Amino acid sequence: MTEPTHAEAHDGSLGSRLNWLRAAVLGANDGIVSTAGLVVGVAGATDDRSALLTAGLAGLLAGSMSMAAGEYVSVSTQRDSEKAALALERQELREQPEAELEELTELLEERGLSRDVAREAAVQLTERDALRAHARVELGIDPDDLTNPWHAAWASFLAFTVGALLPLLAVVLPPADLRLPVTVVSVLVALTATGWSGARLGAAPPGRAVVRNVGGGALAMGVTYVVGSLLGATGV
């Protein structure tokens, strides 16, 4: 008999990679929907290629920069909080090591270990690296892998840009009479792909996610097209 294999990762890297992938999919999805809504709205008012290109590029740059800035601020705040929590934990370990050892023991007990086993594990973890043990068990933080705001900002910027390029190219490259249908079909196909990918990465059924994603994108394009058409008809 062959021994069963178990290749599942247990070092936290798998969860981290999945989080980054989900963030990338969501960023691309935002780029698709927001830029598609913008260019379809402008297409409702005019068929001028220059106007469409200008609007699409402006939306792409504004959206990608906004996403990057927002992600940088958010992750910087998270990183500051993580560093402050580690500093406090370091101080507590220095000033009251016995109390911290008891706290670690109780935390391990809460995870299902018996008192004796939890105490022995807490002692061994403390002797090996007390701060790392408390950071992971008590705080859920890896002190060697704190969140990086620059990585998050660049990832959001690139994901949004990649997503936004699809509706932008779809609306400016085809002939005037095909721009709208090509854009709508391209966007709906892309939203189907991002909805399915996001659901699969989150281990959720893809059907509802795809319907929500496609429905939301179609609604956004429909509303902006109607508004653009009305404004174009009135000469605004």
Image (cartoon, helix red, strand yellow):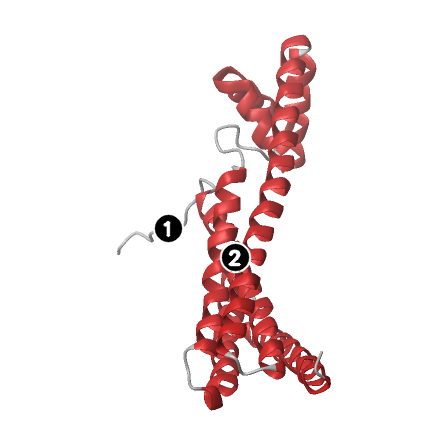
Instruction: Identify the image quadrant of residue 118.
Output: top right
Query: Does 168 sit above or below residue 147?
Result: below
- Whether residue 138 appears in this view of the structure is no
Tell me the residue that label 2 is attached to.
22
Query: Does 73 sit above or below residue 48?
Result: above
Rate crowding at label 2 as few (under 14), some (14 to 19) or many (20 or more) other CA atoms within 10 Å.
Answer: some
Label drawn at residue 60: none
63 and 130: which is toward the camera: 63
Residue 110's spot in the image, x, y percent?
67, 35
Label drawn at residue 6: 1
Q: Give the Cα distance between marks 2 and 1.
A: 25 Å
Residue 139's spot in the image, x, y percent?
63, 32
Amino acid carrying label 2: it is: Arg
Kindly give the residue lying farthest to the bottom in the view shown.
Answer: 177
The structure residue drawn at horizontal position 57% and vertical position 74%, both measured from the top left corner, is: 39
The structure residue drawn at horizontal position 41% and vertical position 46%, both measured from the top left corner, is: 9
169 and 222: which is toward the camera: 169
The structure residue drawn at horizontal position 56% and vertical position 48%, both measured from the top left corner, is: 68
Instruction: Identify the image quadrant of residue 133.
Output: top right
The structure residue drawn at horizontal position 50% and vertical position 39%, both measured from the top left corner, is: 150
